[in-house]
Amino acid sequence: MCPYLSYRDSAREVMDFYASVFGGEVSRSTFGEYGMGTTEEENARIMHSQLVVDGKTLLMAADTPDSMEVAPSTTTLSIFGGAAEGATLRTWWAALTEGGTVAQPLEPAPWGDSFGQVTDRYGTPWYFNIGTQ
C-alpha cells in the first residue's frame, strides 16, 4: 500500500520536500501534459507524482482540479523502525518538524520505545515509533 496525498496546488513543492527528507526520485505528470487542465495555471499543476526510494514507491500525490473540492487530509502516516534504523528515523523526524507542529515530542514512551507525533509544514500528520531492538 502507498498513501496518495491531495493538494490544491502544492504537490510539486511537497514531493520535492519529501524527496529531500527521504531521498529517492520524484516522477510527475501535469494536467497540461494530458490535456486535462482548463486554465494555464491548472495545466501546470501536478496530475500525478510519486516518490520512489530504493525501487519502491513511498508516497504519491496530486493537485486537485479547481472544479473539485480539496478535503483536509485525514491520513496519518506512521513510521516504525528498530534501534538499527534509529539514527535515520531521527533525521527524518528532525526534517519533518522544521516548520511543522510537534504534538508529542519524540521521547521514551511507557512501552519502552521512543514515540512522537508531528504535523509537517504541509499539514500531513506523522507518527514515529523507534524500537529499542
Image (tube, helix red, strand yellow):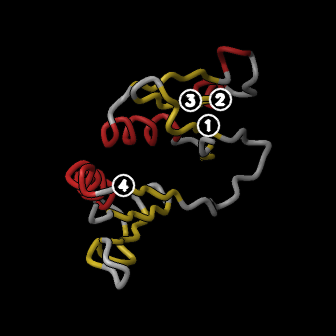
Q: Could you say where residue 27 lies in the image, as x and y percent from the top left?
A: 50, 22
Cα separation between marks 2 and 4: 32 Å
Task: Count the numbered circles shown.
Answer: 4
Check disc 2 and report its element: helix, strand or loop: strand
Specify the amino acid type for callout 2.
Met
Q: Which residue is mark 3?
A: 49
Residue named by callout 4:
81
What residue is pinned by disc 2?
Answer: 47
Q: Are marks 2 and 4 in contact (CB under 8 Å)?
A: no
- Please tell me which of labels 1 and 2 falls first in the chain: 2
Of residues 106 and 103, the one drawn nearer to the viewer in this rendering: 106
Q: Nearer the viewer, mark 1 or mark 4?
A: 4
Three-letter amino acid code at disc 3?
Ser
What element does badge 1 sit on?
strand
Q: Secondary structure at mark 3?
A: strand
Cβ atoms at labels 3 and 1 below 8 Å apart:
yes
Q: Earlier in the sequence, mark 2 or mark 4?
A: 2
Image-quadrant location for residue 121:
bottom left
Q: Residue at x 37, y 41 (%)?
A: 17
* Foreground tag (2 vs 3): 3
Q: Which mark is residue 42?
A: none
- The kind of residue on which mark 4 rests is Gly
Task: Please identify the residue farthest to the front as the structure is shown.
Answer: 133
Residue that sits furthest to the right in the current view: 67
What crowding class fits label 1: few (fewer than 14 Cα within 10 Å), some (14-19), or many (20 or more)? many
N-terminal-most mark, 3 or 1:
3
Q: Residue at x 31, y 43 (%)?
A: 21
Image quarter in which the N terminus is found: top right
Residue contact at pointers 1 and 2, CB within 8 angstroms: yes
